[in-house]
Amino acid sequence: MVDANGRTVAASIPQQNGQGMLLIKYTVDGKNYTNHYLYGEPPFDMKQYKKLLEKTGIYDLKNYTVK
């Protein structure tokens, strides 16, 4: 249990090299959720970010443009 607005370490992952994206999948009360996390040193290439997001399929990016 974690208090409201609290935090606790649930797990850890080794530090990644370069830049990339981790896909996070979890279940709460029987409902599945998905999110993502960018790793690496900013700045991030927004075109590469969009390509990675498209691969995940977790967001509808049809009308999203990178400037």
Image (cartoon, grey):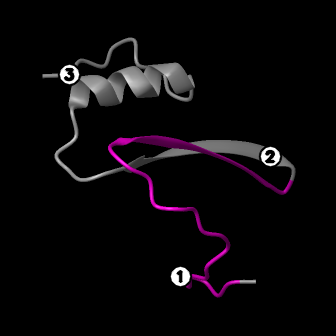
- The residues bearing labels 1 and 2 have C-alpha atoms spaced at a distance of 21 Å
Mark 2 burial class by Cα count in 10 Å: few <14, some 14-19, many 20+: few
* Left or right for 25, reference 20: right
- Toward the front, the furthest residue is 17
Residue underneath mark 1: 5
Badge 1 element: loop
Amino acid at the residue labelled 2: Lys
Quadrant into which the N terminus falls: bottom right
Residue visible at 20% across and 50% down in the picture: 42
On the image, the x and y values in percent for residue 30 come to: 87, 50
Q: Which secondary structure is most common in the magenta stretch?
A: loop
Q: Residue type at mark 3? A: Val
Give the x, y percent position of residue 3: 64, 88
Q: Nearer the viewer, residue 51 or 61?
A: 51
Residue 6 lies in the magenta stretch: yes
Query: What residue does disc 3 label?
Result: 66
Q: Residue 38 in the image: x percent, y percent?
A: 39, 47
Res 23 → quadrant: top right
Q: Which mark is residue 50?
A: none
Q: Which residue is mark 2?
A: 31
User: The disc labelled 1 sits on which kind of residue?
Assistant: Asn
Q: Quadrant of the C terminus?
A: top left
Q: Residue furthest right?
A: 30
